[in-house]
């Protein structure tokens, strides 16, 4: 199974952009790149997903490298409510969603 | 739109006892998932249903865990008998349909403590 590698933790200042990296060097051509986040004491929440092209939505942007071996989740202006564990996940045609340990984002006021 | 509902939110039992969790997915969602999340780890998929049929239960410990989704709507997950290592949050999620591009919506989870 294709796996992802993320930093264990990152810090950001409030109202500044945050770039959360993810490496997935063994990604296959049909794997989708998904990002979910989990706030304390809540279930995971969908953030964004993409296949090959960069994607934008109201929550974030997803930048995918040309070779698709890495991606970056971009929060344009971090708020205290963005403090969470962020998971980068590859999903294949079997529909599996294999979570890793994720990146714990701390936002400082 | 109502989200995924789960009950109970918390459960404490002694080892070797039985426990059941209930999940009501978002209306119209054909695909339902159960995950186990141990403290400090990401969620692990236990079982996936498409309507009332099992799509994937490869990571479900079938000697003690069982799940059903009668009528293709609500689902229950049962543990019998429970072990100490079953202490975790059990998350239910649903999606409109299966497939790798579909968003999953998660419930708040049931926190199980086995003493």
Image (spheres, grey):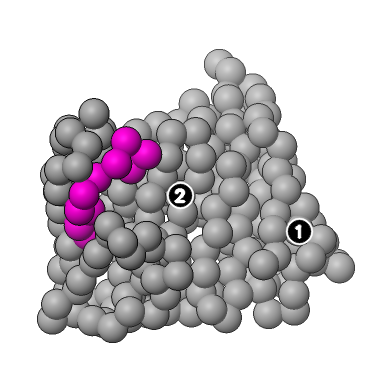
Q: Is residue A55 magenta?
A: no
In depth, the one of B40 and B30 nearer the eye is B40
In depth, the one of B73 and A76 nearer the eye is B73
Q: Is residue B99 left or right of residue B69?
A: right
SS for dot 1: loop
Which quarter shows the C terminus of chain B? Answer: top left
Q: Chain of mark 2?
A: B
Q: Which mark is residue B43?
A: 2
* The magenta segment: B77-88
* Picture quadrant where residue B26 is located: bottom left
Which quarter shows the N terminus of chain B? Answer: bottom left
x, y percentage for residue B88?
A: 34, 40
Residue plotted at (20% across, 71% down) = B68
Q: Above or below — where is B7 with respect to B101?
A: above
Q: Is residue B75 left or right of residue B34?
A: left
Q: Is residue B86 magenta?
A: yes
Residue at the right extreme?
Answer: A67
Question: Is residue B23 visible in this depiction of the protein?
Answer: no
Residue plotted at (57% across, 24% down) = A107
Q: Above or below — where is A19 with respect to B102?
A: above
x, y percentage for residue A64?
A: 76, 61
Q: Is residue A96 left or right of residue B89?
A: right
Which residue is tagged 1? A24
Q: Nearer the viewer, mark 1 or mark 2?
A: 2
In depth, the one of B111 and B1 nearer the eye is B111
x, y percentage for residue A97?
A: 52, 63
Q: Is residue B103 left or right of residue A11?
A: left
Residue at the top extreme?
Answer: A109
Marks 1/2: CA–CA distance? 19 Å
Residue plotted at (17% across, 33% down) = B14
């Amino acid at each position: 199974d294709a796996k992802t590698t993320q930093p264990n933790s990152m810090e950001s200042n409030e109202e500044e952009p945050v770039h959360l990296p993810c490496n997935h060097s063994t990604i296959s051509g049909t794997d989708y790149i998904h990002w979910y986040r989990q706030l304390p004491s809540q279930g995971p929440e969908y953030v964004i997903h993409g296949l090959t092209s960069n994607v934008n939505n109201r929550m974030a942007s997803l930048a995918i490298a040309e070779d698709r071996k890495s991606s970056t989740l971009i929060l344009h202006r971090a708020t205290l409510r963005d403090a969470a564990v962020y998971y980068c996940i590859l999903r294949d045609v079997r529909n599996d969603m294999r979570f890793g340990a994720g990146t714990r984002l701390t936002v400082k006021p | 739109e109502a989200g995924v509902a789960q009950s109970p939110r918390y459960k404490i039992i002694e080892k070797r006892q039985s426990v059941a969790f209930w999940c009501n997915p978002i209306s119209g969602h054909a695909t339902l998932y159960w995950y186990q999340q141990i403290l400090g780890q990401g969620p692990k998929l236990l079982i996936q249903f498409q309507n009332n049929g099992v799509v994937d239960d490869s990571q479900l410990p079938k000697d003690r865990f069982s799940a059903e989704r009668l009528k293709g709507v609500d689902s229950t997950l049962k543990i019998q008998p429970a072990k100490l290592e079953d202490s975790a949050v059990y998350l239910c999620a649903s999606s409109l349909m299966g497939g790798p591009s579909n968003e999953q919506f998660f419930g708040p989870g049931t926190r199980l403590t086995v003493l």
